[in-house]
Image (spheres, helix red, strand yellow):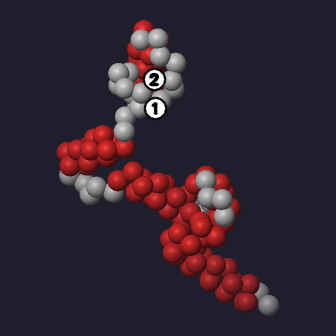
Amino acid sequence: MLKQYKRRQVKEAWQLGRTETVVFSDFIHEYPNNRTLQTRLRTHFKHADVPNIGFHGFRHTHASLLLNSGIPYKELQHRLGHSQISMTMDIYSHLSKENAKKAVSFFEAAMKSI
């Protein structure tokens, strides 16, 4: 479905003489503004009857899923574009409760082997 959308988008851009490579475009305006995108997203959330987490909520969910699946903080820092690891740690360290439990298990196993 995304490939089909991309093909249609490229075709319409070519027909209009546009060269921009935007993700979402109506080909009339340069780029949709933030307010328009927020309104559209809010409409989709409302129709789906789910909480409105906004665009930043998607970013936070993405980071949370990666972190809890075991991705190192340094990799998460780079994916999110944080210049300092401390920013990543300050924002997301509370999310690694499962990893904290694993650390306790590893420590207990290490102590038993002594």
Q: Position of residue 45 (x, y in %)?
A: 26, 49
Along the horizontal axis of the image, is 57 left or right of 68?
Answer: left
Q: Residue furthest top?
A: 15
Tell me which corner region of the image, top left, top right, bottom left or bottom right, holds residue 71.
bottom right
**How many callouts does the rendering have?**
2
Above or below — where is 51 with respect to 17?
Answer: below
Helix, strand or loop status at disc 2: helix
Residue wearing tag 2: 6
Along the horizontal axis of the image, is 35 left or right of 100?
Answer: left
Task: Residue at 42% x, 55% y: name it.
Answer: 56
User: Is residue 1 in view?
Assistant: no
Task: Residue at 56% x, 63% y: name it.
Answer: 67
User: Is residue 59 in view?
Assistant: yes
Task: Residue at 64% x, 79% y: name it.
Answer: 103
Q: Which mark is residue 23?
A: 1
Q: Position of residue 79 (x, y in %)?
A: 61, 52
Along the horizontal axis of the image, is 19 left or right of 85?
Answer: left
Q: Position of residue 44 (x, y in %)?
A: 26, 43
Q: Are marks 1 and 2 in contact (CB under 8 Å)?
A: no
- Which residue is at the front of the view, 52 or 49? 52
Q: Which mark is residue 62?
A: none
Along the horizontal axis of the image, is 18 left or right of 34?
Answer: right
- Which residue is at the front of the view, 111 or 48? 48
Task: Residue at 58% x, 78% y: name it.
Answer: 100
Looking at the image, is mark 1 or mark 2 earlier in the sequence?
A: 2
For badge 1, the amino acid type reads Val
Q: Quadrant of the C terminus?
A: bottom right
